Amino acid sequence: MDDAALETASRLFRAIGEPARLRLLSRLAQGEMCVTELAASEQESLSTISQRLRVLRSENIITRRRRGKHINYALADQHVMELVFNALAHATERPPSASGQHSYSGKENLL
């Protein structure tokens, strides 16, 4: 694996690693939203939401497009959507049995 790719992936995980930003991503996984809609749904100020979106956008996790006088935000691509869904699914899984048995998918050699 190339060092630049590892660094980029690390920045991506740092950006989504904060619960409030991850919550925004889970909302955007349901469809495009503007800052005003996100702020209302999160009960946060526009500036707080804008700052979180700026972090996510700087890592190309979300995109924005103008719709009239509003700017809508959306997940950048299917990879981001899958990453969000997989992270949340993993977080809600039951821990493996205490026997210490691990199941491997065959993807262990990716690194």
Image (tube, helix red, strand yellow):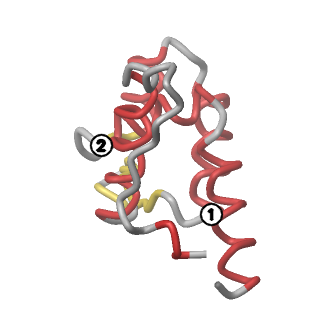
Examine the rendered structure and indicate whether residue 81 appears above or below residue 102: below
Q: Residues within 10 Å of mark 2 (few under 14, many from 20)?
A: many
Locate the N terminus and report the quarter of the image it occupies.
Answer: bottom right
- What residue does disc 2 label? 29
What mark, if any, has residue 103 been given in the picture?
A: none
- 107 and 19: which is toward the camera: 107
Instruction: Judge from the rendering whether residue 19 lies leftward or rightward of residue 39; answer left or right.
Output: right
Instruction: Judge from the rendering whether residue 16 lies leftward or rightward of residue 77; answer left or right.
Output: right
- What residue does disc 1 label? 59
Q: Secondary structure at mark 2?
A: loop
Where is residue 18? Give x, y as percent. Answer: 66, 33
Examine the rendered structure and indicate whether residue 101 appears above or below residue 37: below
Where is residue 59? Give x, y as percent. Answer: 62, 63
Instruction: Judge from the rendering whether residue 102 lies leftward or rightward of residue 105; answer left or right.
Output: right
Q: Residue at x 34, y 65 (%)?
A: 77
Q: Residue at x 48, y 24 (%)?
A: 39
Q: Type of residue at label 1?
A: Glu
